[in-house]
Image (cartoon, helix red, strand yellow):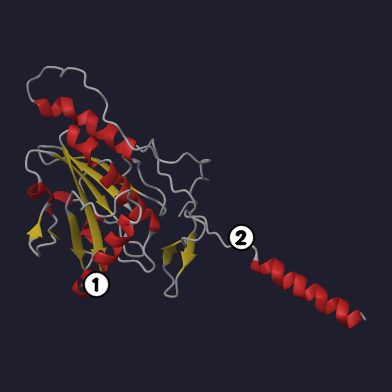
């Protein structure tokens, strides 16, 4: 009788263990086999939200505009070549991670949804996809397919350049390597100067679309070049991000 009772208890414990929350805080570090610190897992990502308040937190002089990326045509492109005379919002994803980073694909999908709002402010958008070798370039297609699952109309083309950072050369130049790349966002003004730089401390640490539009909006008076304050404009319509309870502050590294 006692044996049956113990067996029943063990079975209940095993079932309870299977139902435990396996989620991982996106701000948590995970130790990799080589002793380096990788980002946490993606389980339990739930509703993904980014920061509506995200002031510049990284060097503006890391050499972004001197880096050559690879366009979909195979040509090497520098950021200034993409839209001369325009403000450019550059978003560096984590790259060809396995599995695909849901934070990166969600961020890219929201940039697509709100691309017209950036255009209204006279800005271009560019997404950078870091890869370790040229052979990994095919993974970009899988990434963009995942992005399209987050759009209302998956048939719509990506309206802005998506560039490859082959062999992580740009990532290393910017000093943002970590388990491929830290998520990072830069804004380059019409004169080719980096005016905003935000590097995430964890996979979910990224500025939201409204935060980026606000930063781009700050550059418009300077871009007008006539010394006069431009007339007030209506704010671009932004596709709202889901509201959730704020997450905990990321652990210090």
Marks 1/2: CA–CA distance: 33 Å
For image coordinates 32% across by 40% down, the residue present is: 209
123 vs 7, left or right, is left
Query: Label 1, on which residue?
Result: 136
Give the image location of residue 91, x and y in percent: 26, 50
Query: Residue 150 versus residue 233: which sits nearer the camera?
Result: 150
In this view, 27 is above or below 178: above
In this view, 124 is above or below 37: above
**Is residue 59 in sight in this rendering?**
no
83 vs 14, left or right, is left
Query: Residue 194 versus residue 132: which sits nearer the camera?
Result: 132
Query: Residue 80 versus residue 244: which sits nearer the camera?
Result: 244
Query: Label 2, on which residue?
Result: 21
Name the secondary structure under disc 2: loop
Q: Quadrant of the C terminus?
A: bottom left
Name the secondary structure under disc 1: helix
First in sequence, mark 1 or 2: give its number: 2
251 vs 103, left or right, is right
How many C-alpha atoms fall within 10 Å of the one at disc 1: few (<14), some, or many (≥20)? some
Q: Quadrant of residue 59?
A: top left
């Amino acid at each position: 009788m006692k044996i049956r009772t113990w067996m029943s208890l063990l079975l209940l414990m095993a079932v309870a263990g299977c139902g435990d929350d396996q989620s991982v805080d996106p701000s948590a570090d995970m130790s990799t086999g080589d002793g380096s610190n990788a980002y946490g897992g993606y389980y339990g990502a739930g509703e993904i939200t980014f920061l509506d308040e995200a002031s510049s937190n990284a060097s503006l002089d890391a050499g972004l505009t001197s880096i050559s990326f690879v366009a979909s045509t195979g040509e090497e492109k520098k950021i200034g070549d993409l839209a001369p005379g325009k403000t450019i919002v550059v978003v560096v994803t984590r790259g060809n991670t396995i599995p695909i980073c849901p934070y990166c694909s969600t961020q890219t999908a929201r940039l697509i949804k709100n691309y017209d709002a950036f255009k209204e402010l006279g800005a271009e958008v560019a997404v950078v996809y870091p890869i370790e070798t040229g052979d990994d370039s095919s993974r970009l297609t899988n990434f963009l397919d995942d992005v399209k699952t987050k759009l209302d109309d998956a048939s719509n083309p990506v309206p802005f350049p998506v560039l490859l950072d082959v062999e992580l050369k740009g990532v290393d130049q910017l000093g943002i390597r970590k388990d491929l790349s830290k998520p990072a966002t830069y804004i380059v003004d019409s004169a080719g100067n980096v005016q905003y730089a935000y590097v995430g401390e964890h996979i979910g640490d990224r500025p939201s679309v409204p935060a980026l539009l606000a930063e781009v909006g700050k550059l418009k008076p300077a871009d007008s070049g006539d010394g006069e304050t431009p007339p007030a404009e209506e704010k671009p319509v932004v596709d709202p991000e889901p509201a959730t309870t704020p997450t905990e502050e990321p652990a210090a590294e």
